[in-house]
Amino acid sequence: MKQYDTDTRKILSALCHAASLFSWTIVSLGLPIAILILSEDTIVKKNAKEALNYQITFFLYALVCVVLIFAVIGIPLLFALIILSLILPIIAIVRVASDPDVPYRYPFICRLF
């Protein structure tokens, strides 16, 4: 089994999750896709897939919240979603930096990949 550099694994995994802080830009999807394609490390690939799943799921959650704004319940849900979209990637970055050998799994998301 090939041994991968721990520092490179930390950086690439953290970049995958940090890209989601650039929400609503092409970077949030493009960077994890590029890392998924270019990396040979299985842990980094799992982190890239998880970051993509996170972005897609939160986009779908945002669409639901926008629709629910007409029922008034969407406003507090959208506010909570914004707070979570800032907190969860930071937690993921800290976790992959502290333990780079274990891929991070976001709570509350649908895993499409």
Image (tube, rainbow, N blue to C red):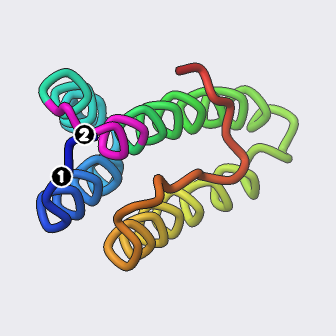
Q: CA distance from mark 1 to mark 2?
A: 7 Å
Magenta region, residue range: 39-46
Q: Magenta segment, principal secondary structure?
A: helix
Which quadrant of the structure image shows residue 9?
A: bottom left
The answer to whether residue 43 is magenta is yes
Q: Residue at x 53, y 21 (%)?
A: 113
Out of 43 and 34, give the one closest to the viewer. Answer: 43
Q: Confirm or deny contact between disc 1 and disc 2 (CB under 8 A).
A: yes
Identify the disc placed on residue 27.
none
Horizontal and vertical percent position of residue 92: 45, 64
At label 1, the amino acid type is: Tyr
Circle nearer the N terminus (1, 2)? 1
Disc 2 secondary structure class? loop
Horizontal and vertical percent position of residue 46: 42, 38
Out of 106 and 4, give the one closest to the viewer. Answer: 4
Identify the disc placed on residue 41.
2
Horizontal and vertical percent position of residue 31: 19, 36
Q: Residue at x 63, y 29 (%)?
A: 111
Which quadrant of the structure image shows residue 76?
A: bottom right
Q: Is residue 46 left or right of residue 79?
A: left
Q: Residue at x 27, y 60 (%)?
A: 14
Q: Which residue is mark 1?
A: 4
